[in-house]
Image (spheres, rainbow, N blue to C red):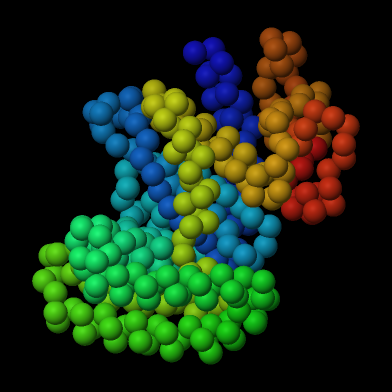
Amino acid sequence: QTLSNWVIEAAHAWLPPLWEYMKQSLLQRDIILCDETTVQVLKEPGKPAQSKSYMWLYRSGHDGPPVVLYEYQPSREGKHPQRFLQGFSGFLQTDAYAGYNQVADVTHVGCFSHCRREFTEAVKAAGGPGKSPKALEGKAFCDELFEWERRFRPLSFAERYEHRQTYVVPHLEAFLGWAHETKEQVLPKTRLGRAVHYCINQWSSLTNFLLDGRLEIDNNSSERSIKPYVIARKNFLFNITPRGAEASALTVSMIESAKANGLKNISSISLRIYPMQPAATSTISCLGQRPCRTTAVWVANRTTEPASPAARSSGWFFL
């Protein structure tokens, strides 16, 4: 309990200004990817202890140094990303969760990994590849798209855009024609029917990755960024209070942003105490002694090895 309180108090005392700075930087980007996952908070006001709360993830795309931010909210309502993303007007890449539709003035970009997953589940539900040729055909269309993307990965973003127009657009046109034809042949409530309807209903957002070579065909980057929290949740199980969940969001934002910027040898985030520094961000009691000002700094490792130029330029070292 004491150690938890230390982390909570340190996070709330020092990290909010940095988190807010990173948020404003993120909102100025052209691309933002989002995801969300559940978290249990035992003492959320107005909610039973067994209810679900949510940790939302917002991260940048291929348009600058990576920024990865977590935000705790008591629900999955669309008003939360709507509020967080106020002022953003670029590409918003998500899964097909309807809550993101409340975000206005953005270009919604879908996730072909989710589309392929629908056809994969249809193949499994039918009993295997030989039991549902149509489901296998849908999955094959998706697999070929990902194969094209694998081939384009070494290219520049401009070259990837041009190659997509040449090779991917005709394939997508054939895929959509197949989907409309198959829709008339299957029942809508079957697993294959649901996969086909998902494909058609989400087609506009699914194909918006063609608009910019920096966009990915899927939302896997945000899913990878939220996975460390999902794994950690299996160990800590729950937060007692919303303040604790907010502290988790602040600290994990710093750690995952550092990792995304290539600081793979990071051993800790250290809060060093500098008495009465002019650039201070917070004033606290230093171990029961006189008040002092604090500044958050990253510790790449516990040696005297200097930070790389790339790490310095990314903006994650603070003194």
The quarter of the displayed image where residue 185 is located? bottom left
x, y percentage for residue 227? 48, 44
Is 144 rendered above or below residue 309? below
Query: Is residue 137 visible to us here?
Result: yes
In this view of the protein, which residue sits in the foreground, 167 or 211?
167
Determine the residue positioned at 51% across, 40% down.
Answer: 228
Is 243 rendered above or below residue 67? above
x, y percentage for residue 210? 49, 80
Determine the residue positioned at 80% across, 28% down.
Answer: 302
Whether residue 86 sits left or right of residue 189 in the image: it is right
The quarter of the displayed image where residue 277 is located? top right
Quarter of the C terminus within the rendering: top right
Is 301 rendered above or below residue 133? above
In this view of the protein, which residue sits in the foreground, 1 or 13?
1
Whether residue 176 sits left or right of residue 28 in the image: it is left
In this view of the protein, which residue sits in the foreground, 130 or 4?
130
Determine the residue positioned at 26% across, 70% down.
Answer: 135
x, y percentage for residue 6? 58, 19
In this view of the protein, which residue sits in the foreground, 159 or 215?
159
Query: Is residue 194 visible to us here?
Result: no
Is 282 rendered above or below residue 77? above
Most extreme residue toward the front, as rendered?
130
Determine the residue positioned at 56% across, 38% down.
Answer: 252
